[in-house]
Image: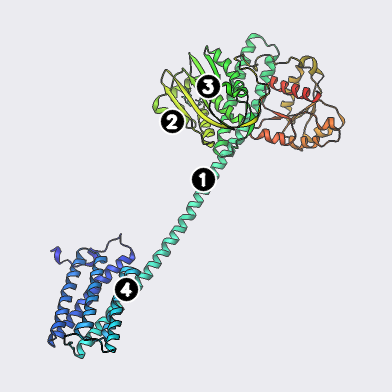
Amino acid sequence: MDFFNFSINKILTREQSILDQARIRLLYYGFLLAIVGIGALYLSVYLQDLHVMSLTLGATLLLIIALFKYLTYKPHWHTISHILLVMGTLINLATVFVIMQDVNIITIQIIILVIVFSFYMLGQNWGMFFSLLNLLPVLIFMVMQYDHNYYIDFKPEKSDQSTTIIAIFANFILIIFIHSHFYSAFLKNIKQLKETGEEQAALNIKFERAIEKAEKSSQVQSEFLSTMSHEIRTPLNAVIGMSNLLLMNNPRQDQSENLEILKFSANNLLAIVNDVLDFNKIESGKVVFEKIKFNLVDLMQNICGGQIIKAEEKGLLFKLDIDSSLRRKVIFGDPTRLTQIIFNLVSNAIKFTAQGNIWVRVTCLEDRHNNITVGFSVKDTGIGIKKENLETIFEPFTQESITTTRQYGGTGLGLAIVKRLLELQNLQMHVSSKVNEGSEFSFNMEFPVSTEAVARVKEPTAEPQPQQQQQPHVAGVEDGSSSLRVLIAEDNPVNVMLMKKLLSKWKIVPTIAENGERAVEIMQYGNFDIILMDLQMPVMNGFDASMEIRKMPDPAKANIPIIALTASALFDIREQVINAGMNDYVAKPFKPDELMEKMQNLVAAVNS
Ligand code: ADP
């Protein structure tokens, strides 16, 4: 039964574009019209006994019926159009050159039909091809006929007027049908384009709003974190500072133990706050890498100094191997960030190792003329990491397992920070680890080398660095510094009290300025050896005050050493401090001995 199903709905599908649907409809209804028209023509010529014509029209009619069947079976409009056009061309040329040997209005109509049909159905190239294929021979025929050059051995058939009328009618109807059909499809197409355009625009607006919202919320979140961390740091400074002071006051044994716990916890909390602040900064893309001169051997010794003590306290053997060729090299890079990376890796190694050793190696892998590639590796004999966790441990706030958190504490931010810091410099971290055997974290980094050589380099030593808990290193300060005249610019009364107490250890009675402007005023009439300058102060901040002081006419005042005190964890702080004319900075909460050492060195440098 399906064979006789000629319904057009069978061949129209949703996937076809509006234009293709129009093409199929055009073929479908065009075929029906043609069958009627050609049928009438066939009857007309058959009745006039025009044999060749009726044969041609009969064959055409059969072919068209066959194509109609094919179309309703499979809508291959492309193939069908080609067949139709080839057929039309053959009939057209045969009629002109053989059957009628004449060009009349019907020939012109057929050519127009071919042109319209071929362009609409097959596009520009095929349209042009079939149009010329039909038009050119006809033009040549007309010229030859005009010159009386055309002759073939066949008597042309002449139909009567009724056939001509039928043909002309049928052709015009077809031409009008094709045009009107395509015109409506064209309009429909434009309307649809407009609609999709509008939909797209609406979608785009929605999309933009969503992005804006997401950006804003992430910015708000990052600002919130920043503010919170900063606000937490300030009271923490006081807690750590006070415990330092109390520890320096020769407390009883039990008090001392409690104070150590207090200090340890406060330091821990500070480390966490710093991590969060830092990670936040890295994530929001605010990290800029410095390019300053330093010596890798000095830096590594500084980083590992404190860590060696921690390792030894746990009974671990700490080995620090540095390529001796690096000893005399001054390189360019960001020591702060490098410190952060190594420090995190070494802290983890110590934290996750109960016995055995920690091995930090710095190897010069390649030494080109003014560029070196250095390999860093931190290896331990600790608990190790399961293979399936080797990637996840680098995710922020992720630790290997819940037991890790319970047993070792931590935030799971350390490695995330390390990884991001390396990635920002297009570097990669390699990890190899075996459970219960140990882990190795390694990466390579390139540094430009300065032409100058290090004048004096400390010999590598595993000697413990002076620690906060120990009595501050005051050699040479004891005698000289008690006479040090110190001006402190600081607005926070807790910090002022802290500084006063701290300095009283060295019998220094500082002068206090509650803001930058006061500091400048006091400097004008007083004489001082050094200024400790808080950076965030009301009325006039530390940067501006320093710049004012540097402008003073008296060279002794203009060149006074200034140390910035800051609670800010900004990493470009060094640059800002130096730009404002200050000599150095100490981050709060500072280690008393670090501050004393800096003060002592700066004053000595000015006096020498
Ligand atoms: P945290 O140290 O605060 O837990 P990290 O991001 O530094 O966070 O480390 C993530 C996790 O990776 C750790 O919790 C631990 O499970 C694992 N890990 C890191 N370093 C080592 C190591 N040297 N040995 C074993 N496990 C490690």
Quick one: 53 or 435, which is closer to the camera?
Answer: 53
Which of marks 2 and 3 precedes in the sequence?
3
Label whose residue precedes the other's in the sequence (1 or 4): 4
Query: At 79% across and 14% down in the image, what residue appears?
Result: 479
3D distance between C-alphas at marks 4 and 2: 63 Å
Which circle, 4 or 2, is nearer the viewer? 2
Q: Secondary structure at mark 4?
A: helix
Which residue is tagged 1?
Answer: 214
The N terminus sits in image quarter: bottom left
Numbered disc 1: secondary structure: helix
Q: Residues within 10 Å of mark 2 (few under 14, many from 20)?
A: few
Query: Residue 391's mark?
Result: 2
Give the residue at x 26% y 89%: 148
Q: Amino acid at mark 1?
A: Ala
In primary-sequence order, the first of circles 4 and 2 is 4
Alpha carbon separation for disc pair 3 and 2: 23 Å
For label 1, count other residues whose C-alpha is less than 10 Å away and answer few (under 14), some (14-19) or many (20+): few
